[in-house]
Amino acid sequence: MKKDTSLESRGASTGQTPPAPEAEKLGRVEVSPEAIASIASEAVLEKSYGVVGLAAQRLRGGRAEMLRPEQYREAIKIRFDGDEIILDLYVIIEYGLKVSEVAHNIMSNVKFEVERHLGRPVAEVNINVQGLRQTGEEPEGGHRRHRRDNRDTKETQSQ
């Protein structure tokens, strides 16, 4: 019996997606933990509502330390359980927002983006909220993200 390879036999007439053809064995693809962390950090910072920044895993002087972009890898711990990925993220979120809603939003965004980019299942995304910050609050390390205070200039002009 001849095998039917027409489009109709593969689901085209029914509107179903035809099965993917078997992939040839060309070799392995390995993705580094740093690459996974890059995908996850972008999902947290660019696509998640209420996130102030990524944080160090340990508190410094009892306060959460916000990391600079070149340090983001320190805020993301990646483990593997067979074919599945487990991520632990350390974040600082906006004060006044419902922590559980922000955390679930981060979980959904990270899971979606990592699975979309890698095609591998994400078993867990664990969120560790290291601190809460109000917009404009001085982060640890003195890196201000808002405009400069002009009081000194005004006082000089009035004298």
Image (cartoon, rainbow, N blue to C red):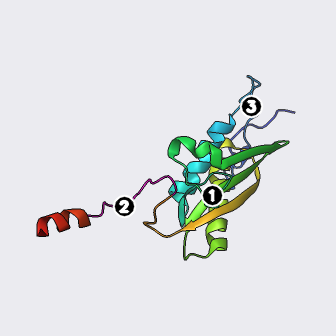
Residue situated furthest front in the rendering: 159
Residue situated furthest right in the rendering: 1
In depth, the one of 156 and 11 nearer the eye is 156
Secondary structure of the residue carrying numbered label 3: loop
Mark 3 vs mark 1: which is more N-terminal? 3
State if disc 2 and disc 3 touch (CB < 8 Å): no
- The boundaries of the magenta stretch are 140-150
Label 3 packing within 10 angstroms: few (<14), some (14-19), many (20+): few
State if disc 1 and disc 2 touch (CB < 8 Å): no
Q: Is residue 144 magenta?
A: yes
Report the amino acid beneath label 1: Gly
Tell me the quadrant of the picture where the C terminus can be found: bottom left
How far apart are labels 3 and 2 at the CA level?
Answer: 51 Å
Side of 140 where 18 appears, left or right: right
Q: Residue at x 51, y 45 (%)?
A: 69
Residue situated furthest top in the rendering: 26
Mark identifier at residue 23: 3
Q: Is residue 104 magenta?
A: no
Secondary structure of the residue carrying numbered label 2: loop
